[in-house]
Amino acid sequence: MFKLKPNQVDRVDGRQKVTGSATYAAEYDFPNLAYGVLACSPVASGEINAIDIKKAEQAPGVLSVICHANIDLPPGYATDPKNEQPSKEYKIFKDNIVRFAGQPIALVIADSFERAVYAASLVKAQYTKTPAQTDFEKARNNGKPVTGGDEFKDYVRGQADAYKNAPVKIEAEYSIPLEVHNPMEMHAVTVVWEGDEKVTVYDKTQSLMDAQRNVMKLFNLKKENVHIICKFMGGAFGSAFSFWPHTMAALIGAKKIGRPLKVMLSRDQMFTLVGYRPQAHQKLGIGATKDGKLTGITHNADAMTATYETFTEGIVNISRTLYACPNVNTRYKVFPLNLSVPTWMRGPGETTGTYALESAIDEMAYAVNIDPLEFRLLNYSENDPEHNRPHSSKFLREAYQMGAEKIGWKDRDPKPRSMKEGKLLAGYGMGTGVFIAWRGGASLSAKFTRDGELILQTAVTDMGPGTATAMTKLASDKFGLPANKIKFVMGDSDLPPGIFQGGSGTMSSLGTTVNNAMLTLKQKLVDILKTTSIFHTEKIHEVDLKDLVFEDGNVMLADEPTRKISYTEILKLGGTPQLEILEKSDGNSDQQYTSYSYSAHFVKVLVHPLTGVVTVDKVVSAVDAGTIVNMETARSQIIGGVIGGIGMALMEEGVIDHRYGKWINNNFADYHVPINKDVPHIEALFVNKPDPWLNPIGSKGLGEVSMVGFPAAVANAVYHATGKRIRELPITPDKVI
Ligand code: MOS
């Protein structure tokens, strides 16, 4: 029997993290460990004519310098002519082509990190430069978008551009700059080869399985000979999925020198070598009747990608589904630039897209003179209008209500520039977040011993949300065992294949497996019970799981709770040394429902009328993510996403000098992110109602949806405070005054 308990499990790895005993990818030490540092191209486009690595090779402590001119190409570099265009493909040191400024041109390996840094500064190359285009606005106005691929097909429901004929219409353009994940922990990798056929990689990765596959492919290795370990990550937010150049370089370098090798990126390299959120320009056209019924939505988005690889994401997708609107059309294009390739970044395209959509919806609400919340409720989509099918659950209405009540939405004066607090202008704004909820396959081993300990093992990693903690809480609830008796082991590709961590899928996917494993274990206990006469009752032989209560490591009959027996006692009675199972659960491929998680963000800002400085004063984010397994870590997820959203709304902006195609602000002094003073009290509320269909635990996932919709809430609050629409993020003081 499952009871949702009010108790929380504190971070099971909290002590390790705060005492420094948690080991991150750059913190593994080995005898004879060597250090690799990448030397990178200052040129954004062209070819290397000559490269001088002699000085670096002769520098003190240098063991090896690897570049395109001397590399032993690994077997995985061979190009399959059917699938790959050799001139575009980028594999580190494979050729002399330079595709972006900051592209690695050499890996310098030395016996100390400092010596490697110094020697890397001695690598010099001569280039034939070709014109580099890094200016997104120029590219989207004069350049050619990438063609082919379903994601570039226009979506039309009803009539295209119907908004143009609406009684009330708005047209507006919104832009976001390039933004970078910048987790505190730098990306790093430590590689240990045993001979030429076996390797252990201490990596920073959101997907052990993908990391393993990539290494297998690169060197033609057997699965059992590629061991990936990632025990802890200091944030990733989407930046730790891909097979990045520094990881390839470390693998190649370690093999060449026959010693363990560590490569860690510097902060400036974090801006070019591990992806970013692509700059985007969006045009929204919205039409409505005078009484506020949406009649048409047109959402066009242009974004950037690299010349050598195409990255796409769902920028326009939410506009097709969030509101009940008969006529919706979307268009999405990406333009290649001489920059490194973008990747997913927290809430990915949905965050970018809802910034524009939820800003435009706010503009329309004011245009028809209806409260922005009421306007959203008036156009609430009960079913998924894109696929014309029901939602497995949608408690967005409840989230709206919870959030509005908590922030005091109805007490505000809706008139723009009408509210003041002292000398400051005050404003309230809201924005809706939506992110797909899904379930993938995952497996897990579970072992319950006679010591009363439950050990769960699976190949998943944790970029910070507290996967081990939440899974411990889930297992504790489902198996009826105190959390301190449960050990959750992860971060190792030798464990049963788990699920990648990203796209808010860990709880739904792996949670299903944990849930099912706990059921299986309980059934095994009952099977043993049935062979005994412990309850001195005939009933035990026909007893079913549902007739029993599992609590604090004891089983009792639901109708006779005074008599109980401990799990360990059951094992002893049955002569069973331990219970051990391997549980596998499948993903959900059924298409009869649409599942999304939702967030309703409410923000209060204060704006200085003279300096234009915007301060986020209060945040209430109410979330429908299905059942919340562990309140404390769920709350932290929302707080994290909101802080990312404050950065996106007010500060973050990657600036490239287009004359050289190089970064201007690739450091934390110039690339601004929120600090403590920028972050107010953040109230995270949860509807906490189970999704009855997606998985047996009822959870929909909440990592991404914490950020989706938030930047629009800030922009809308700034409008309410000042009467000024700022359609270009970040909302810096120069734009406000
Ligand atoms: Mo998700 S983009 O992996 O934070």
Image (spheres, rainbow, N blue to C red):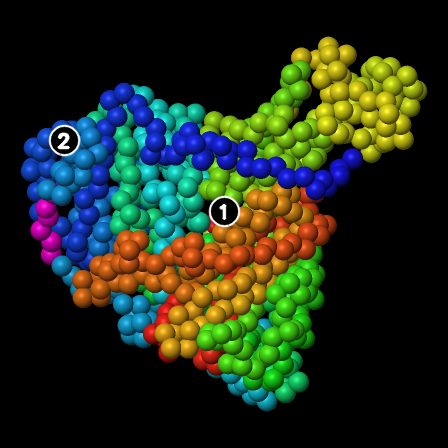
Magenta segment's dominant SS is strand
Depth check, front residue: 545 or 243: 545
Q: What x and y, as percent, mark residue 354?
A: 51, 66
Element class at badge 1? loop
- The mark that comes first in sequence, 1 or 2, is 2
Label 1 beta carbon less than 8 Å to ligand 1 = yes
Asked if residue 350 is positioned above or below residue 513 in the image, the reply reads below
> Label for residue 32?
none
Residue farthest to the front?
Answer: 422
Asked if residue 269 is positioned above or below residue 584 in the image, the reply reads below
Amino acid under disc 2: Val
Residue 215 placement, left or right of 700: left
Magenta segment range?
123-128
> Residue placed at 89% from the left, 27% from the top?
560
| Image quarter (top left, top right, bottom left or bottom right) of the N terminus | top right
Residue 732 placement, left or right of 591: left
> Residue placed at 50% from the left, 54% from the top?
641
Q: Residues within 10 Å of mark 2 (few under 14, many from 20)?
A: many
Q: Mark 1 points at which residue?
A: 502
Let me know if residue 123 appears in the view: yes
Q: What x and y, as percent, mark residue 333?
A: 40, 67
Residue 354 placement, left or right of 52: right
Looking at the rendering, which quadrant does residue 484 occupy?
A: top right
Depth check, front residue: 337 or 606: 606
Amino acid under disc 1: Gly
- Report if the CB atoms under discs 1 and 2 are less than 8 Å apart: no
